[in-house]
């Protein structure tokens, strides 16, 4: 068992080095501009039909497209409202763009746009094994796919509440739990940086946070080994690591 794992891990390392020259520009969703099924727009919490009409008008959206993108359009829920070209131009005139990230296709992204506090690391906690990191975050914060992949689970599960599992290349999966809403369905292909859920406090959770796991052949690995070590997250990582030492 152990041998297989080491072999699998070595082959992953090899493929990492093969792909590391594979640089590309990735457009990352943000709070104002998001992407869904090839359309640029935004996930909006729509309480009623009056608000729906207001938003459609504001974004200059095409009603037929709104219906097509949200076949089970529900009130008090998030629906994707596409932007008209004119609305997109207004945003870009105001300096609002989707974030551009240059990376290799194998680079993971942090599943949140900003990381302020890591509340738990991988490892033993309260006498059981905690297989991922917990990122404390206010409810309804967008959660993005860490890598391209295919959604293999998107539903309520015991413990992790509303949970999304994405299968990536080379036997990797990522798991995002305790969401308020999941925005993807089993079988969907998602791009790195695409919003897949909104954070919450569902399942066995003692406060609003995102539980995030990286697994290789179903073995939980330390997500911090895969996530970018950038300026934005350095503080949060240093703080939690110094507590552990
Ligand atoms: Zn957790």
Image (cartoon, rainbow, N blue to C red):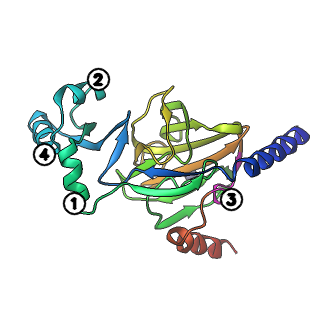
Q: Which mark is residue 225?
A: 3
Q: Is 131 part of what is drawn in magenta? A: no
| Above/below status of 235 relative to 15 | below
Does the residue tagged 4 have its C-beta within 8 Å of any atom of ligand 1? no
Depth check, mark 1 against mark 3: the one in front is: 1
Instruction: Please tell me which of labels 1 and 3 falls first in the chain.
Output: 1
For label 3, count other residues whose C-alpha is less than 10 Å away and answer few (under 14), some (14-19) or many (20+): few
Label 2 residue SS: loop
Q: Which residue is mark 2?
A: 71
Q: Is residue 87 above or below residue 119?
A: above
Label 3 and label 2: CA atoms lie apart by: 39 Å
Between the residue at mark 1 and the residue at mark 2, the CA separation in whole angstroms equals 32 Å
Q: Which is in the foreground here, disc 1 or disc 2? A: 1
Q: Which residue is mark 4?
A: 58
> Can residue 222 be found in the magenta stretch?
yes
Q: Residues within 10 Å of mark 4 (few under 14, many from 20)?
A: few
Respond yes or no on whether mark 2 lies under 8 Å from ligand 1. no
User: Which circle, 3 or 4, is nearer the viewer?
Assistant: 4
């Amino acid at each position: 068992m152990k041998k297989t794992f080491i072999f699998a891990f070595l082959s992953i390392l090899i493929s990492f080095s093969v792909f590391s020259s594979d640089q590309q520009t990735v457009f990352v969703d943000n709070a104002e501009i998001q992407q869904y099924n090839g359309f640029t727009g935004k996930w909006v919490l729509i309480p009623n039909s009056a608000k729906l009409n207001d938003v459609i008008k504001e974004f200059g959206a095409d009603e037929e497209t709104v219906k097509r993108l949200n076949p089970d359009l529900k009130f008090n829920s998030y629906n994707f409202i596409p932007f008209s070209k004119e609305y997109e131009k207004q945003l870009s005139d105001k300096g609002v763009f989707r974030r551009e990230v240059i990376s290799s296709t194998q680079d993971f992204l942090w599943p949140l746009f900003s990381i302020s506090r890591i509340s738990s690391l991988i490892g033993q906690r309260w006498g059981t094994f905690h297989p991922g990191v917990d990122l404390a975050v206010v409810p309804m914060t967008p959660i993005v796919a860490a890598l391209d992949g295919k959604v293999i689970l998107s539903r309520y599960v015991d413990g992790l509440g509303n949970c999304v599992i994405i299968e990536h290349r080379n036997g990797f999966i990522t798991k995002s739990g305790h969401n308020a809403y999941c925005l993807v369905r089993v079988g969907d292909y998602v791009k790195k940086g695409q919003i897949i859920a909104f954070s919450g406090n569902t399942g066995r959770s003692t406060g609003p946070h995102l539980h995030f796991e990286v697994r290789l052949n179903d073995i939980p690995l330390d997500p911090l080994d895969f996530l970018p070590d950038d300026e934005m997250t350095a503080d949060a990582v240093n703080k939690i690591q110094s507590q552990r030492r």
